[in-house]
Amino acid sequence: MDLCHNTLDVFYRSPTGAVPAGTRLRLRVALCGSLVLDRMDLRVWNGSEHCYPMQLLGARDGKTFYETHLTVGDTPDLYWYRFEAYADGRKEILGAPNDHTGCGEGVMGSPDSFQITVYDPAYKTPEWMHDGVMYQIMVDRFFHGEGTDALLHAKAGQDILLHQDWREMPALNISENGDNFANDFFGGNLEGIRQKLPYLKDLGVSVLYFNPIFEARTNHKYDTSDYMRVDPMFGDEEALRRLCKEAREMGIRVMLDGVFSHVGDDSVYFNRRGTHGKDVGAYQSQQSPYYKWFTFRNWPDDYDCWWGFRTLPNVNEMDEDFRRHILNGEDAVVKHWLRAGTSGWRLDVADELPMPFLRELRQEVKSVSPDAAVLGEVWEDASHKIAYNQLRSYVLGDTLDSVMNYPLRDALIDFLMGRKSSTVVAQSLSSLLQNYPKPFLYALMNLMGSHDRPRILNVLAGNDGNDIPRAERANLCLSKEERDRGIQREAMMLRAVMSVPGMPCIYYADEAGLEGCADPFCRRTYPWGEEDQQVLCVYHTLIQMRREHPVLRTGECRYLSPCNDVLGILRTIQGGQDALGRAAQDACALTFINRSSRNVTLYVKTSDVMDAQCLVSDRNDVLFASEGAFSIHLDAMRGVTYFAKLS
């Protein structure tokens, strides 16, 4: 039996995509050929199983269609469904193949299940996330503000390296457990960021995301010592307040990094090194007020720690005292720093935090400011993440506003590096359109580079250094051929990121053309005065393009795969309303990126671009329709975005 169901086609599934609780859906399936069925059933699972008989709808063009309706419950949840056809004693199952949109990841007991995300109808995310352009900064590596002496604030006895030359390579200093000590500093600080706000404003940035800024022993600060104190090397609370105030006056918001699954062993809470006085931390005394925060198998030296790193003791997030300190106390951490002028939190390893903790965090953050953001680090499809053998859905409206969009990053890299065809990539990205509610989808953090990965230029150049010893990576420099190729691919990836729903995120100095292998070499200082002007110009141009065209921010989205080497992105606003229900002018934008080394000509029907008769590219090239279609020429290793003239 040959069965067909297309989750992206309103004929087969209406409405498509994620739906609010209580929605009634129409589902259809087609049987190809002349076989007569005994019956067709819809099997649905959302914790319990239900089967619904499907009605014969009729036949057309050699296909027989069956239809049924499904009303989802009033409680936000995930539903999976598949079709079961019976004929002549045989049963045929139709579910989503592994590369199909809406795959249920085997939650029904088999991998072939279509997913329906059912979310809270009251789910809203901040509008500034939908329209924003984000910029990620590791504070120590961005800029040293004049008139400050932050480097004098190292703790007594702390073994640190102070770089004398801003252009030096970060130090690699490996500990016995394979981690980098990260004890070298360049002197970047909050005052330096404040002084560079005009640069960031001119670039087109509207959201700053800082890696952790709280007191910690390392340069990256993911080993928190005190959640209530800005690290003295970066400044103080007043410096943060001043920065947030001046940034907001320029239309720029500030998001902080919340590391709530673990702390540093040198923290006031654990105090393994004894730098915070006697009998303070859980390592020193079982009478410590923080003792219950941690799990000791054999106190004090055998304790639960993050991924086996003894410098990062795990916390018991559901401990009442820990939650009071972080979440629900009158001056709890998540509230205090919002009141200091920040606009939200990016949550480190959000998928390692208990779901009740995330729900409470969201409630407490929104109680201070409904417009504040809660964004999580989740590397997979966040609608059906499996963590610690449990299904966790972050898209239902009760935990996160959105997540870091690693699936987009991975898909675009795979496409540009020739590892996957545009068809496969379009299908995988379309699954996110299906599984994510629009409030979540349009608030995604669409990153290219990050502090956790080699510089995106190296990745796309095909030389990220991962195949050479770690100690040799500091000396790796791209050849001219590699660099040119990487720059071309980075421009295409940036264009794609600027053309999809969510916040494009720039990792500091990617726009300057900085190279670097994995940590710590992807954490080099910003090369002020030595930027690659070619790369910087591309970033300026494409950010400006996105900011000038609302359709690229909040238009409906569809992925296209006209041929294996070309990926397309169609954005539309129709009927005077954007994808989020806001009033907006009708518009249409069409982006193509051609990864191949040859020129390509495509034909696009006018009916696919809202019946426009004229297209204008971002470079002001003008195309006119002929016989109901446009002939679009794509240069090798280049991208282009066309905007429809609708009047």
Image: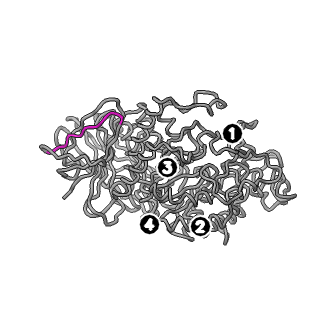
Q: Amino acid at mark 4?
A: Ala
Q: Does residue 54 appear in the picture of this structure?
A: no
Check residue 506 in the rendering and tell me which mark sits there, or answer none. 3
| Viewer-side label of 1, 4 | 1
What's the residue at 67%, 70% (across, down)? 331
Give percent across and percent down for residue 67. 27, 50
Residue 171 on the magenta span = no
Q: Nearer the viewer, residue 39 or 178?
A: 178
Q: Amino acid at mark 1?
A: Ala
Q: Earlier in the sequence, mark 4 or mark 3?
A: 4
Separation of marks 1 and 4 at Cα, in angstroms: 49 Å
Q: Gap between marks 4 and 3, in whole Å?
A: 31 Å
Whether tag 4 and tag 3 are in contact, CB under 8 A, the answer is: no
Q: Which mark is residue 171?
A: 1
Dot 2: element? helix
Pointer 4 local density, CA inside 10 Å: few below 14, some 14–19, many at least 20? few
**Which residue occupies 69% across, 60% down?**
227
Residue sitting nearer the eye, 272 or 42:
272
Q: Mark 4 or mark 2, which is nearer the start of the sequence?
A: 4
Q: CA distance from mark 1 to mark 3?
A: 24 Å
Contact between marks 1 and 3 (CB within 8 A): the answer is no
Helix, strand or loop for disc 3 = strand
First along the sequence among labels 1 and 3: 1
Mark identifier at residue 122? 4
Mark found first going from the N terminus, 3 or 2: 2
